[in-house]
Amino acid sequence: MSERALRGTRLGATSYETDSGIDLAPRQDVAYSCPNGHLFEMPFSLEADVPAAWECRVCGAQALRVDGEAPQEKPGKPSRTHWDMLLERRSVADLEEVLAERLEVLRTGGTMYAPPIPPSAPKSTGRVAPTKKSASAAPASKAPAAKSPARPAKKAPVKK
Ligand SMILES: [Zn+2]
């Protein structure tokens, strides 16, 4: 780091041991410029694979190498979206499951939320309009009909 390390540091942040007698690894200073006009240099080992871009030390933007050899269009990391992060935690199959659960809760009126009824819509009698499925799946005639013949059978007199 030599004399550069003295600039803008606080006591305790840096060792002030001198570099005398120390062989520093051969380095190169690579200049980067960020889209917001900041110029800065980063020291790299000569053997280092110098990245084409570096986070700007001033504003954090993506700064590119100044010496033209840089912009090798690597398929760089695309920025992660919220969707990407979600997919890291759950698979699509998981999400389908969760979605189905939530929809079921909504359909059965399990939350406080009731969709606003537009004034032009026909008046519904109940708070939750029954879906076509549940209306046709539970015909009133079937269930009682099956039960009623069962009752007399149970009450069949037991002979002593
Ligand atoms: Zn910048």
Image (tube, rainbow, N blue to C red):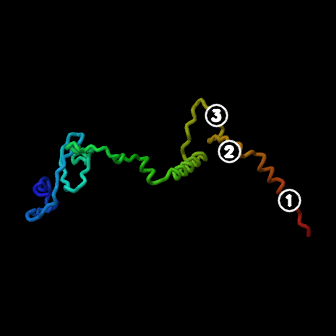
Judging by the rendered image, the residue that carries numbered circle 3 is 123
Crowd around label 2: few <14 · some 14–19 · many ≥20 (10 Å): few
Screen quadrant of the N terminus: bottom left
Judging by the rendered image, the residue that carries numbered circle 2 is 134
Considering only vertical position in the picture, is 19 above or below 8? below
Task: Decide which of tag 1 and tag 2 comes sooner along the chain.
Answer: 2
Badge 1 marks a residue whose secondary structure is helix
Residue 49 is tagged as: none
Task: Decide which of tag 2 and tag 3 comes sooner along the chain.
Answer: 3
Horizontal side, residue 114 vs residue 57: left or right: right
Q: Position of residue 76 (x, y in %)?
A: 33, 47
Considering only vertical position in the picture, is 133 above or below 16? above
At horizontal 52% and vertical 53% (from top left) the residue drawn is 94
At horizontal 78% and vertical 50% (from top left) the residue drawn is 144
How far apart marks 2 and 3 lie (CA) works out to 19 Å
Q: Amino acid at mark 3?
A: Lys
Q: Check mark 1 vs ligand 1: CB closer than 8 Å? yes or no.
A: no
Task: Decide which of tag 3 and tag 1 comes sooner along the chain.
Answer: 3
How far apart marks 1 and 2 lie (CA) works out to 31 Å
At horizontal 78% and vertical 46% (from top left) the residue drawn is 141
Q: Check mark 3 vs ligand 1: CB closer than 8 Å? yes or no.
A: no
Q: Nearer the viewer, mark 2 or mark 3?
A: 2
Judging by the rendered image, the residue that carries numbered circle 1 is 153
The answer to the question of whether label 2 and label 3 lie on touching residues, with beta carbons closer than 8 A, is: no
Badge 3 marks a residue whose secondary structure is loop
Q: Amino acid at mark 1?
A: Ala
